[in-house]
Image: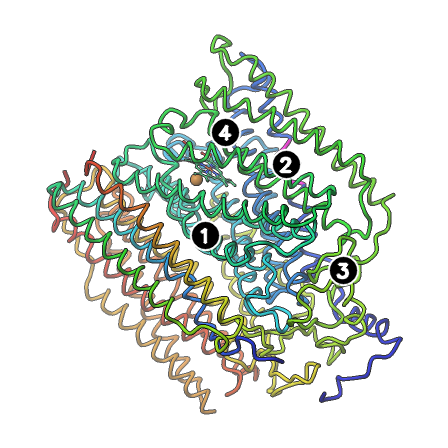
Amino acid sequence: MSGSVEQPPQPANALRLHRQLAAIWATGPGVQRLAAVNHSVLGLRMMITSFVFFAIGGVLGMLTRVQLATPNSTFMDAGTYNQVFTMHGSMMLFLFAIPMVESVAVYLTPKILGTRDFAFPRLTAYGYWCYLFGATILTVSLLAGVAPDSGWFMYTPLSSNVFTPGINADVWLLGVTFVEISALSLAMEIVVSVLKMRAPGMSLDRMPIFGWYILVTALMMIVAFPPLILGSILLEVERAFGLPFFDPARGGDPLLWQHLFWLFGHPDVYIIFLPMAAVLSTIIPVFAGRPLVGYRAIVVAIVALAFLSFGIWVHHMFTVGIPHLALAFFSAGSAIVAVPTAVQIFAWLATLSHGRPRWDLPMLYVFGFFFVFVAGGLTGVMLAMVPFDWQAHDTYFVVAHMHYVVAGALAFPMLAALYYWLPLLTGRSTVQRLSTVAFWLVFVGFNMTFFLMHLTGLLGMPRRIYTYTGYESWNWLNLLSSVGSFIMTIGFALVVIDLVVQLRYGRRVRRDPWRATTFEWAMPIPPQPYAFASIPHVGAGTDRTEAGRIALSLARGEGYLGAARNGWQETLGVHMVSGKPDQLIVLPQPTYLPLWTALATAVAVLALLFKLYPVAIVATVVIAGLFVLAAQRSGHARDYGPLPVGRGVSVPPHTEVAEAPPWLALICVLVADGTLFASLLFGTFYLWIAAPNWPGGVSPDPSRLLALGAVAALAVGAVASRLSLRALAAAGGAQGWIVLAMLALAGSIAALVGMMGGVTPDPRTHALGATAVALLCFVVVHAGIGLLFLVSNLLRLAGGRVSPRRLVDFRLTRLWLDYTTVTGVLALALVLALPALVSVLGARA
Amino acid sequence: MNARGHSVPARRLWWLAAGFTVWCNALVLLYALHAIGCVFAWPAGALRWTLVVVFVAHLVAVGWLWRKAASAERGAAAGDTGNFLQVVIEWTMIAAFAATLVTFGPPLWLTACL
Ligand code: HEM
Ligand SMILES: [Cu+2]
């Protein structure tokens, strides 16, 4: 044991430690709540917010069921119905499902992994605000009667400005993208946190399976969202500025939208499913009274699932006229995706059958899940068969399938999770009788509502119709389905009542009421802002210890970091594989910065919505400034060297190590950004190959000289940033190199803008020009962000925030500029080559 | 601190993604080549053989990765964590091999551009 932080445990230690840590970690009262950055606070807020949107989305769903209960209904007109069902789907998926699973991840992951918070608390807060503001914009549009009305998937050309001239579609494109900023930023921080911030000794094979699921899900989000974000940007640009990416009359292709959308859309269904599978894999062993069967098999299965789910998006497009041979790839892929899903289901069943299952409320919902999800999985495999899909596509059969899987994979485990973790959140246990009734109402109502949709679908009822004549033999089925939806709603209402009753009258629970072994139960109930008074150690001896048993020793400060130091919010970073502590991570205090940044982002989004472009530009500059400011405030102003962290271990602060969280975060950003870039390349090639009205042999000549100049300038920037890093490491002057890099980037931006001016054909008249502009814009934006990195470097250099030992900033800049150079070369090569390609391969058949 | 698996470097984690990355690559290449072949009216035989070659090349690539993963150090020296990663990586390779075989093999028998 070393250093002054080690004190022998004393009886009063727990309370004193609690007071000290609470003072450091707490979020202030009153308005200061808006400055919260703590994962417990934000996770809970996000959860509650998502449930509010669940309620609104649910009401919208009920409205559609009222409309469809009887033929020729005059309850809603067609226009209103379009808004209602579009918002129902969009809200449920973008404003409820994704944020809800993320909120579960935010709230629980650090606790289950035995650490005090996520790596980037300010980003958590920014993510939350973006979600709230984006969702609010969408909701307000509903109240104003200008809600999106082209379906939750916004197919072009219906959503293009020819057919949807109002701002309805813009609300969706901008609002949903805004919300996705939050999804992406949270995903990145989850990846970094799961990999780097676990309890010491928690090697990857000791990590609770929950961590694997959340890690894989977050990685999937990083890759899944960029295609949709790109699609939304391109469609918004087409609608606002007339660049024809999706307009077939000018060389665009409406099917490009479907590709980009489902490239996101299919992985998204697994992004929703996997965290819920994480819940099941966590709960089932507790109730079975034995460890999960097939831990390794499940890890393999979720890795496989993650990849396979990206390769089957075309099963949503079986009817668009793609050649059979290509369809067969996706059909086969869709069928085998059932295998890793089945592996998990059998692992759960085996866990139950090998254990001595306790029957408690969460298990009731687990049972509901099994029933509903397996049924939905089977209809999924049916739809994956091309000939069947040709019959069932765009009918209520698909609506039935998706509700069985999305609602089954989401609602039932979600309620199981709620009842399982509610004692942790509230310190009270549920009132059994009410919740059992609630379950059966939800279960029966659910099956009644959605099972019958299989039948109406097979009887030919198309999706998205607002009424029917009454002679189609769908009347009874639709009426019963509507009745079922009311039963289900009553069930959900009972759940809500049950929660309220529980909060007021529930029995107080002791620590670890379920006798679980995961660390979220090894803390005071309800959780404190610092989560663990000291951080647990994981080793062979602790693997199956009930969490409640170690709680007291942790509270007395007998784990790592069991003392307050410098008023720092401290937690540990570990080696990604072995879980050996390798850095002391000091987290930022509560701040209003995320709120201001999100507000500025909201202004930018609204300005784009109302076409006030100068305002949007100003807001963007403000956002950039706020990000630079946020960077200013992080890290330490001096070198510390190794600091004692308890149990005889000393590690350097995160500012002084190579594998620091920001470094990993940048890698995540580049993966996301690289996916966006790849999608843009895909889109360009796609239009070239598939879009109608592409000229055979135009030879627009983009200026080679400017292109060469731009690339050379980017390269100079990258080299200069390398040299600045070298200079800093050698304690020399780095300013000169930084300024040189800035000049080079500015030069390349000038050259690129020059090229954009000279693009032929005019980008508004043909997609060939439009894609060229899009590619050039991509490079300009990245060079611009590179400038921000360099500005930040200069400021931090001046403020003493970097030193030969604290190099992370400069390494980030170097990586960013390398990336910018590589993508820049590729983008410019494509801009130069595309017109030539058009003539090289000759005429299309 | 014990040193379980301490010797396993973090970059070993990339191997978890390697097998299925090849699968993804096969999908992208096959899908793109097939589309290009059909659009530019390549002769059906030539198109099919191109696809078969690409398919087999990817199968070989996954197979090679599988062998490489299987031959990594195992046993007490690798530690619990090392052995865990080893097994998991090997099985992702096996899964990726099977997936490549099943998803891309049979479709190549179909009429090229119908
Ligand atoms: C064995 C696994 C699955 C297979 C093979 C499968 C297959 C399919 C197919 C082929 C379609 C398109 C039907 C059409 O539009 O003609 C579809 C639609 C859909 N699936 Fe699945 N699915 C599976 C699992 C899931 C899961 C787990 C979820 C959600 C958690 C899900 C959510 C959806 C949704 C939301 C749609 C409808 C999208 C829309 O058109 O609005 N599926 N599925
Ligand atoms: Cu799908």
Label 4's element?
helix
Task: Give the quadrant of the N terminus of chain B.
Answer: bottom right
Chain of the residue under label 4 = A
CA distance separating discs 4 and 3:
40 Å
Callout in the foreground (2, 3)? 2
CA distance separating discs 2 and 4:
19 Å
Q: Is residue A798 left or right of residue A820?
A: right
Expressed as whole percent of the image width and height from the top left, the position of residue A40 reads 70, 58
Q: Which residue is mark 4?
A: A399
Tell me which residue sits at (77%, 57%) in the image: A512
Callout in the foreground (4, 1)? 1
Q: Amino acid at mark 3?
A: Pro
Q: Is residue A40 left or right of residue A654?
A: right
Confirm whether circles 1 and 3 share one chain. Answer: yes
Q: Earlier in the sequence, mark 2 or mark 4?
A: 2
Task: Please give the label number shown on residue A527.
Answer: 3
Chain of the residue under label 1 = A
CA distance separating discs 4 and 1:
24 Å
- Mark 1 surroundings: few (<14), some (14-19) or many (≥20) residues within 10 A: many
CA distance separating discs 2 and 3:
30 Å
